[in-house]
Every structure is written in structure tokens, then in C-alpha cells.
Amino acid sequence: MSSPQSTPHIAAKKGQIAERILLPGDPLRAKFIAENWLTDVQQVSQVRNMFAYTGKWKGEPVSVMGTGMGMPSIGIYAWELCEFYGVQKMLRVGSCGAYTDELKLLDLLLVTNTWTDSSFAQAHSGVALDTMAPTSALTNTIKTTAQELGTQLREGTVHTSDVFYHGPEFDFRNVYQEHQALAVEMEAFALFYTAAKFGREAGALLTVSDSLVSREALSTEAREKAFGPMIELALDAICKD
Ligand code: HPA
């Protein structure tokens, strides 16, 4: 029997995905990044419209692919990227909702730890794990690159949640107080967990798109404005070393 050319969820052939990859949640963001920042771009997958592209940033090969929303979705892609394509560095570029008024809309947050109330790790390997940190090498590179670029960065823990629309019983202030989670998103824990299983690097950079404190949310235009500096920082940082 011949070995498979691709995976159940990614149509790219082996070798068509770079060792470094940016992972936005939205596949149309992946397309936007590929078209606006990368050169020599080739679309390498469109299974389920979860577009993936490979191109170059300042001469270095880099890929970008959507992950979908939530840990089950990013868990599938991260696993296949590591296991089949041999990806070495994965950087999530996404958005988050602030749990504290110290974080303002448009702020850029570097994730230094995650706390989760999800059963992702339990379901995966029967372990009761509720925190996962990004790898320190990539995270430190993002910090030094931000200093070089003059990009303001906040740092801290995020809550990786399975739920976007919580019931009235859920009070985000408890998560903020008990776990020092500055913001909420839905993927980073699973990305870091999967990367750790393969001994690969992973990190996450998030733009604050809404606030659970003030109940404000960014307009679509404001989101796009915030997006540029985050992508440049992400590409410069992931292409170092
Ligand atoms: N909740 C969960 N994930 C998010 C949010 C939110 O409010 N904003 C951006 N990602």
C-alpha cells in the first residue's frame, strides 16, 4: 500500500507546508494574510474552505492556515500539521475578549499562559490538566521583536473556553480573580497542548476585539486596522532563528 499524500482534513502534499505557520481562526483571514503580506504564494489546501497558503516573508518560507473556532477544530489541524507535515513552529494570531478594564480594545496581548475549564486534555490522554504555557523560545522572540518594531505588547494568562455564549450562572470575574486570566479566547490551550505532545514550538498573539467589562466590541474596520501590526510582528518573530 502506498503512503497517503495528504491528511483527512488538509489537501496539501507533504513538503507543501512550511516549517513555520501562522494560524488565524478565520480562513478568510488566512487568505487576507497570504494575499497582502506574503510573496510567491501558493494555495495548498481548501478542504472545508479551511484555506491554507504557503509563500515567503522576507525570503523565508512560511505558511498560513485557518483553524476554525474552538479547541476541537484547532486540535485537528495542529495535530495533522505536526504529525504529517512536520511543522515546527505554530503561532496563533487571533482575537480575545477582555476580562479586565486594564485591557483596552485594540490592545495586543501576548499569551504567556492559558487556563481552561475544558476537558480537552482529559479527553485526549486522560490527564486532568488545566494550564498550558506557550513555548518560551517563541514567546521570548515575540517580545524582543516587538521591542525592535516599537509595537506595544501586553502579556498575561488567557482563559481558553469551550463556550462563547455562557449562561447567566457564569461570571467571568471569578475566572479573572481565581486564575488571573486577563481575557478569553477559544483555542490557545489546545494549540499549546498539541505542540507539546510533538515537542514543537507554539505561541499566541491576540488582539482585544471586545470587552466583557465595558461590553464594547470593535467594528470590522477597526479590527482590520489592528490586524496589520499584529501580522507584521507575528511574521518577523516566527521567521527568526
Ligand atoms: N469569548 C470567547 N472568545 C473570544 C471572545 C469572547 O468574548 N472574543 C474574541 N474571542
Image (cartoon, grey):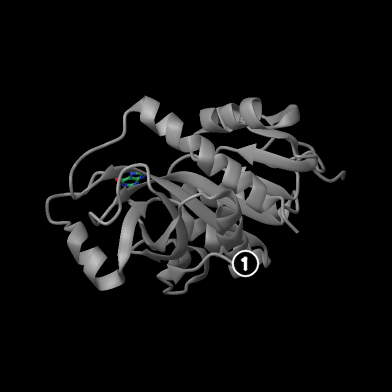
Q: Give, as a three-letter code, the residue at label 1.
A: Lys
Residue 89 visible in the current orientation:
yes
| Image height of 181 relative to 50, above or below | below
Q: Which residue is mark 1?
A: 197
> Which residue is found at the position 24% from the left and 44% from the top?
165
x then y, percent, for residue 184: 33, 53
> Which residue is found at the position 25% from the left and 55% from the top?
99
Looking at the image, the residue that sits furthest to the right is: 2
Which quadrant holds residue 225? top left
Image quarter in which the C terminus is found: bottom right
SS state under label 1: helix
Which quadrant holds residue 23? top right
- Left or right: residue 87 versus residue 142 is right
Q: How many marks?
A: 1
> Which residue is found at the position 37% from the left and 42% from the top?
106
Decide: few, some or many residues near mark 1? Use Cα within 10 Å; few <14, some 14-19, many ≥20: few
Image quarter in which the N terminus is found: top right
Q: Nearer the viewer, residue 241 or 23?
A: 241
Which quadrant holds residue 171? bottom left
| Image height of 182 relative to 235, above or below | below
Residue 67 visible in the current orientation:
no
x then y, percent, for residue 133: 50, 68
Ligand 1's quadrant is: top left
Q: Nearer the viewer, residue 113 or 108?
A: 108
- Left or right: residue 228 versus residue 87 is left
x then y, percent, for residue 75: 53, 52
x then y, percent, for residue 112: 47, 65
